[in-house]
Image (cartoon, helix red, strand yellow):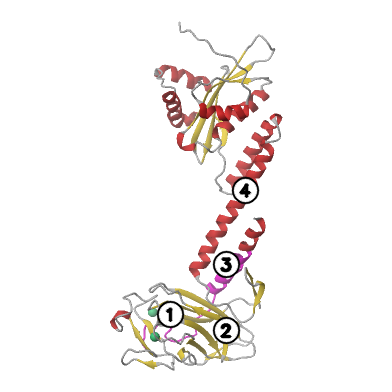
Amino acid sequence: MKLRILTISLVVVVLVVFVFLVGETSQNLLSNPGFEEGTTGFFSDYQIGGPESFGTIRVGSDPNQFNGGWPSMPPFSGAYMLLVDGGDDPSLAVWKSQKLNVVPDSTYFFSFAASSLFQPSPADLQVIINGQTIGRDIVLRPSVGAWTQVYVYWKSGSASTATISLVDRNTDPWGNDFALDDLNFAASVLPVSWEIWLLDAKRGLWRDVGGISGIDVEGVLLGIVLTALGVWLGYWALTSAGFGARANSGTAGFGDGLVSLQQDDQTARAFKFRTRPMIREIQPTDRVQWDSLWQGYLTFYKTELPAAVTEVLWGRFFNPAEPVNCLVAEEDGKLLGLVHYIFHRNTWEVEDVCYLEDLFTAPEARGKGVGRALIEAVYEKARQAKSKRVYWMTHETNKQAMILYDQVADKPGFVQYRKYL
Ligand SMILES: [Ca+2]
Ligand SMILES: [Ca+2]
């Protein structure tokens, strides 16, 4: 799993750097790059204008106006785009630039936006600079109106001029129609020479010497999101494994597990990852949220308490002379659970024992280990107070909770008797 995450990360790092480089270019050398001035500033081997049929191009703002099979859709930018009815001769340039002056031994980027106009048999585009194909073919997505941005890089070498052309290698004229907009050809602003290496699942690690084609910006963004998810899952898997190893180290390891849990939680917070809740002592500012949990707990036991009782209980948490204590589980500022515990004398030991009187997890936070974490936190507090025993009671119908209790404590077999006075 680690290896896979590493692989995805490397690919995305390369692509992110690439997109960054694309963003950092100097002035666009092309004339009329967005077709806002009509059919000027470029050449074409296709028929320009005239009746719409395969092998023709025109500039327009609504494809449907020229061909009933084409959609009504807006240009990529501005008011106009180039509308191409792909023909059956793959050697014809659909669009060809003027001869552009370039600086030798420099890196240039060529980019454009393209969208299919007719779903069947999408166009298969190829960039050619000074007669040489650059990068791989770009087969457009079949969905009409879905613009794809394509980037290609080119190293000028000894050349001092560049003539760029775009051909459609799909020779099935029933289809292969597309719209083109927002062309850009500009020098990279990076002063040093560089290479792009790609890690590809099919081809392994390879050096891209001719340029990269068909980089789909949405695909890159998806890659970033998937990588973030992968990194998060990896982090989660690693920390969970850590928790498991420590928690399973035996009964004496509970305290260790708790400490680790809190440390890992802090680490996770530093990276803004969601993880197990933090266990901490109650604070006066928790009153509203604590009230809500406490009422939830009382409702579970079908009990109501006079407000004065709750008021006294709350006050005792913050009175150092009182043996009544409260810990809460918090995640992103929200309290998910509470535990109340009391130290008291007993006749069998010199030290006080610890009675865990109330334990409650908010219904929406169940299954996250909140209850276990709260119990283990009480163990740690009792250990610090030199207490040798933590105990609690639950109702015999509370089967769900007993599944957890059976894991973290022993059941000594005592039965409780009670008489109200
Ligand atoms: Ca435009
Ligand atoms: Ca066509």
Which residue carries the number 1 mark?
121
Query: Closer to the observer: label 3 or label 2?
Result: 2
In screen coordinates, is 237 left or right of 113?
right
* Pointer 3 or 1: first along the chain: 3
Which residue is rendered at x = 48% and y = 67% of the image?
218
Which residue is rendered at x = 41% and y = 20% of the image?
303
Contact, CB < 8 Å: mark 3 with mark 1?
A: no
Which residue carries the number 3 mark?
16
**Looking at the picture, which amino acid does disc 3 mark?**
Val
Tag 2 secondary structure: strand
Q: Is residue 245 magenta?
A: no
* Pointer 4 or 2: first along the chain: 2
Which residue carries the number 2 mark?
134
State the separation of the CA atoms marked 3 and 1.
Answer: 31 Å
* Pointer 2 or 1: first along the chain: 1
Which residue is rendered at x = 57% and y = 59% of the image?
227
Q: Give how far across and how far down residue 183 sits, in percent.
A: 46, 81
Residue 110 in view of the camera: no
User: 33 or 393: nearer the eye?
Assistant: 393
Q: Which mark is residue 199?
A: none
